[in-house]
Image (tube, coloured by chain):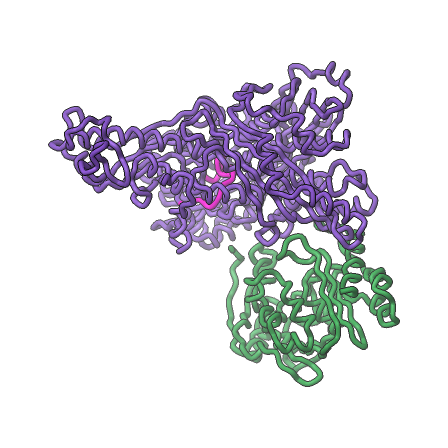
Chain colours: A purple, B green
Amino acid sequence: MSIVGTKVIRKEDPNLLTGRGQYVDDIQLTGMTHMAFVRSTEAHALIKGIDVSAALECEGVIGAWTAADLELPPLPEVPGLERPTLATDKVRFVGEAVAVIVAESKYAAADGTELVVVDYEPLEAVTNIEEATAEDAPLLFEELGSNTVAEVPSADDHQSVFDSAPHTEKIKLINNRCTAAPIETSACLADYGPAGLTIWASFQAPHHLRNRISAWLGIPQDQCRVITPDVGGGFGQKINFTPEFFLAPVLSKILNRPVKYSQTRSEAMTSMYHGRAQEQEVDIAFDNEGKIQALRVFASQDMGGYAIGTGMGMPVLTTAMSAGCYVIPNVSVAWRNVLTNTTPIAAYRGAGRPEATYLIERAMDHIAYKLEMDPTEVRRQNYIPKDDFPYATHSELAVYDSGNFEGALDELLEIMDYESIREEQVANQDMPEKPLIGVGFSSWLELAGFGPPGSLEGFGHLGSWESVQIRIQPDGSAIIYTGASPHGQGTVTTFAQIASEYLGIEYDKISVRHGDTATIPQGIGTMGSRQVAVGGEGVKNASIGIVQKAKSIAAHKLEANPEDIEVKDGSLFVKGSPSKSLSWAEVATFSFQRLELPEDMDPGSLDETILQEVPNFSFPSGAYACVIEIDKHTGDTRVRDIYLVDDCGTVINPLLAEGQVHGGVAQGIAQALYEEFSYDENGQPTTATFIDYLMPGAPDLPSYTSGRINTPNPNNSLGAKGIGESGSVGTPPAVINAVVDALRHLGVTHIDMPATPQKIWKILQGGTK
Amino acid sequence: MIPAKFDYKPAQSKEEALSLLAEYGDEAKLLAGGHSLLPLMKLRLATPEVLIDIGAIEDLSYIQDKGDVIAIGALTKHRKVEQSDILKEHIPLLAHTASHVGDPQVRNRGTIGGSLCHGDPASDLPAAILATRATLVISGPSGERKVESDDFFTDFWETEVKEDELLTEILVPKYTGESWAYQKFNRRSQDWAIVGCALQAGDNPGIGMVNMGSTPVRSADAENALKSGGSPKEVGELADSGLTPPTDIHGNESYRRDLAKVLLQRALEN
């Protein structure tokens, strides 16, 4: 039986469940000090002076520094738009680091920060795109002359198609600002001694940090070691540089002591990167059958106070994927990136693709409203046929490799009882004590498996490959070293499964090591649903390379041809004569012994390193449906059921694939119904704690009903597409489509995320539609 | 959690707690279960110089049948209130309301006295204490005094308990066999109520409202309408009468007024 595709229990769990996991804050070094930050309480202000003298008097405080004291270069981010390591003359969002304290304990460090006096001269703040782009808007960077830092108009607005179309609709959408809120907040520990720098960091891409921080500090990469131990969630937030990682080494060098930073939740809420925060103007033209003729998208991305690489890329990904699963003959896209006095924006699970899916799936339902068609029928009118792959879209980034969008919808309708939900919906409308029922669909498609050469280089990475090294140990066990450093995905398990499948070594004798640049020479990291599609493919290819060599050794010892050797159940044997066999352990031992090897092989050659490349992105897709219940009197809105059909190509471990979808769906429901990071008119955050920022928990979420179809990815030999972001991409429009569906009989055609009970209560009271 | 520096003084008895309070005065805060105070200290919104830990005073944790009333020690944990057979029989509203506080971890640490002394209008238990017309026993340097629940909550997060005093006991009249209800409207299972409503039927029915003013409050007009035989709808319509609910990120004033009406009507119908 094949181990790929089976529900193997995670290798990671016994350690984590018995408290033996090791996170950055668990690490203690002799002589360790603690770093804390004075953070801006103003959204937009000039810094007229910073007085750290009282902090220096504080018991336990070792030192206090401002930008002027350290004169550091800015963070290595977007050229021309770099973010200062500590605020210099000006602050641009509440939570920005203004001064840094190092103390003997974290308590003394926190006490020290309270004693620093910053003299601010407040400036008018811009807290949203409309304010930031208004004429005479206050500017975050006077020298740029505008808050708009990038703007790409469309080549052709297809106005003639709109002019002659039977129907057109104009839709304004807001993709609400969210924060990823991983359980482990940011943390780092830097130890910069005579032999070089070691930095432990809660980060998704250790080599990326190693490469950039060594260049920033001006030290060779061989003397810079980055370790990412257990990482408690990242969701894209932890692939971006923050000032803390750069200041800790600098201060460690100055003090000649290790410096630890462990972020508080309060800091994480305002200083760690947020996601989404995109506004969209969408125009569609369609015929009487519901066939879409043209789509026009203008995406305005709120960048927050500083433009960083992944944030700049969000509208690029959104506009590349705006056409979704559909044949749209005329697509016109434009976008801009706008600075505001809010927390900077970066990638957040899905990163640009949830925004694309939301706009096209809301557009599909608008066609249904206008033509009074069933939403599934509108989608069927427009799907790309399953035989039309590869399919070139308006965007050169998005050449879809495979898919069966109508097949996913068919499967979805198999696992739900659509008809009886519709009957209940109608019946309940006239029964005062029964909830309103709504059902919403989302046929989604995303761009994953980052990516083809050039794709991650654009975000500052060294390459777009992933590294895999497999070394066979003398006893026949195997160790995989990979740059694909996970933060909860279960990569140790899936990579061991793939290796077991193709090496023929049992799963329990395969370990996966990651997250240390000293032992894993090169790597890229975990982002963009790439682990299996890129790194996993590397594991397969490295395994095949090793088996080739092992067969040569076995053939040499068994006096057979290498082509006649087969590998099965932990042994290598001659085809047709199973008695002529060697165990993997015997072959492994021979592989280190010159006298046992064929002449053309050197000792230690069962060791294969691959930098795995892929020719294209992958395109996971699926069809989701959400059933919503709304209390007619309170507006209370709950997801009753959610049905999920995923197509991620080949599944390595169904348990882990399902877990990835469940987490993503939870974040999708959260965005649609619960979460929104908001600010008042002065740029003060109004949702900076979990009391006001409503991240839902398990009791607040429904059980999930799953189905699956499989169109293998033709661009890797595993056939895998990626599953990490699917749930967060596909879910929000399904939920909002369901909420609007429940209120359609009242004439409602849209409600912005999050669909809070108060908004819905207002509608039920006969308020705004 | 990185609070400001404080001294920690554990008290083994009520008397020791009172003497520590006398010694440290307004520099001190009492620590019971910690589930109201510690979050404030974490955010450095509260920076007491001395914490007097009364959590270990075991003889203030009890639920006793005293004939007409049930006596509850102020340090009784929510979980004990929730699971008490005595309360389930005689004051089921209180046991049930306790089951709505936070989550199991919170209920296993938090105490009824701590919750009442915090005086948060968004908390569940004060509404039930008002609806059941309980009496609160406060100990101080000059002995014990009793305060009716109506007079206990004096302002936002403020109660009748003075700086040198300690809430020691809650006396709740029995409502054996009477109907009751607690309706709580919130977004997530462990959130505070956006609005809540505790109803205790009886000769002198009580309606306590959650998050409908700057203190925990009774809805007197609705109580009067109920006494004079109003229908659930008629009584429910008066739920917010005379009250001034707050506006915050979770709900504005008019939404809270409407929720109060719906919840009270549901409490009466169920």
Residue nearest the observer in this picture, B62 or A704: A704
The answer to whether residue A238 is magenta is yes
Query: Which residue is at 69% across, 70% downward?
Result: B93
Question: In the figure, residue B218 lies in which quadrant?
Answer: bottom right
* Number of marks drawn: 0
Residue range in magenta is A230-245
Q: Is residue A361 left or right of residue A764?
A: left
Q: Which residue ends up furthest to the left in the rendered image? A: A595
Residue nearest the observer in this picture, A113 or B258: B258
Q: Quadrant of the C terminus of chain A?
A: top right
Residue A753 in sight here: no
Q: Which residue ends up furthest to the front in the rendered image? A: A576
The answer to whether residue A676 is magenta is no
Q: Residue B125 at what x, y percent from top left?
A: 67, 67
Examine the residues drawn in magenta and state their main secondary structure: loop
Query: Which residue is at 53% across, 57% downward?
Result: B3
Residue nearest the observer in this picture, A582 or A357: A582
Residue A742 in sight here: yes
Q: Residue A172 at what x, y percent from top left?
A: 72, 31
Q: Residue A209 at what x, y percent from top left?
A: 42, 34
Q: Is residue B152 above or below residue A330?
A: below
Q: Is residue A307 above or below residue A330?
A: below
Q: Quadrant of the N terminus of chain A?
A: top left
Q: Is residue A295 above or below residue B29?
A: above
Query: Which residue is at 48% across, 34% downward?
Result: A722
Q: Residue A760 at what x, y percent from top left?
A: 75, 45
Residue nearest the observer in this picture, B166 or A424: A424
Question: In the figure, residue B76 lies in which quadrant?
Answer: bottom right
Q: Is residue B25 left or right of residue A449?
A: right
